[in-house]
Image (cartoon, rainbow, N blue to C red):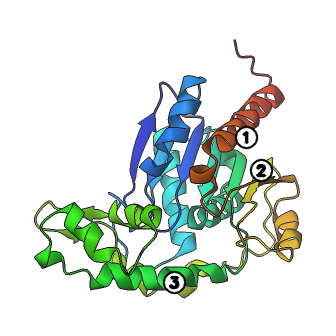
Amino acid sequence: MASLHTELVGDGRPRFAFLPGLFGRGRNWSQVAQALAAAGFASVLFDLPDHGQSAWTPKFSYPGMAKAVASKIDLRLGSAANLILVGHSMGGKVAMLMALNHPELVSALVVIDIAPGASDQVHTFTPLVAAMRSLDLDALTSRADADERMRAAVPDDAVRLFLLQNLRRKGGWHWQLNLAMLGHSLQQIGDWPDTGDATYPGPVLWLTGGRSDYVKPEHVAIMTRLFPAVRHHVVADAGHWVHADQPQAVIEALLAVAVAADSDAGVSRP
C-alpha cells in the first residue's frame, strides 16, 4: 500500500481532510485550509499516491487510493476520525469511494466538480502530459527556463504554473509525480469503479462550477442513488477548479458544512 504524505494546517484534531485532483498536491488547498483554521477548524492535506511527496504505485487504482487514504486516516485518528472529507476531481472520486467503503471515518462529504461516472474531460490532459514529457530535463537551466520552454505547448499561464509545481531540482531536474504511469492511465482515471449496492447515508455537498462541463445531467441519478442525502450547489463564475476560481465561495460552503455537522452532533462552538 502506498505511503502517503500529509500536512496539518491549524491546531488540534483535524476536522477536514482534502484530496486534490490529477497532478495536484495537498498544498494546493492551503489557502482554503488556512481560512478554515482561522475559524477553528484544522485540516489535513493529502498528497495522493503517485503525486507530490507520496509513494509511487505500479498501476492506477481508485480502490487502492481510497484504501490508502482510509488506512492513513485510521492510523492517525482512529475509527472516531469524524472527518469532513473534501475531494476535487480525481480526489473527489477517491473521496466518494472512501465514504462508500469506510463510512465510519467520514462525518460528511464534499465532492467538488466531479461525478461517480465517466469523466471524458480527462483526455484534455493528454496534451499536457505530452508537453511535460517532451520537456528536456537535462537541458534545463532554471524553473523560468522550463516555463518558457513549455509556453508554446501550454499557453495558459495558470495551467502551466499548476503543472510546473511538480518539477523538482534536487538530484537533477525531475517530475515529482509518477508522470509515465499517470499519463498512460488517463482512461482509468476518467472511469468510475463498480461500487455494487453500497451507499453513504451521511450529508453530502456537491459543489460544481457554473462554467464546468465535468458534471452532466445524467450524473444526477447515480449521485442521488449512492448519496441519498446529497445537496447540489452550483458555484457561479467558476470552472473545473472551483476552489481556485472562487475560493471564498468554497470556504463559506465548507464552513457551513462544518457548523451543520457540529450542530447535528450537539457540539456547541463559541
Tag 3 secondary structure: helix
Q: Determine whether 247 is above or below 53 in the image.
A: above
Q: Residue at (56%, 45%) from the top-left corner?
A: 17
Distance between mark 1 and mark 3 Cα atoms: 30 Å
Which amino acid, mark 3?
Answer: Leu
**Residue 199 position within the rendered picture, expressed as x and y whole percent measured from the top left:** 80, 62
Where residue 14 sits, quadrant-wise, is top right
Residue 59 visible in the displayed image: no
Residue underneath mark 1: 253
**Residue 135 position within the rendered picture, expressed as x and y whole percent measured from the top left:** 25, 80
Q: Which label sits on residue 186?
A: 3
Distance between mark 3 and mark 2 Cα atoms: 26 Å
Seen from this angle, which residue lies furthest top? 270
Q: Are marks 2 and 1 in contact (CB under 8 Å)?
A: yes
Q: Which label sits on residue 105?
A: none
Judge from the rendering whether residue 267 lies leftward or rightward of residue 192; answer left or right: right
Judge from the rendering whether residue 35 lies leftward or rightward of residue 48; answer left or right: right
Q: Which label sits on residue 205?
A: 2
Tag 1 secondary structure: helix
Q: Nearer the viewer, residue 170 or 104?
A: 170
Q: Are marks 1 and 3 in contact (CB under 8 Å)?
A: no
**Residue 215 position within the rendered picture, expressed as x and y whole percent measured from the top left:** 75, 70
Which amino acid, mark 1?
Answer: Ala
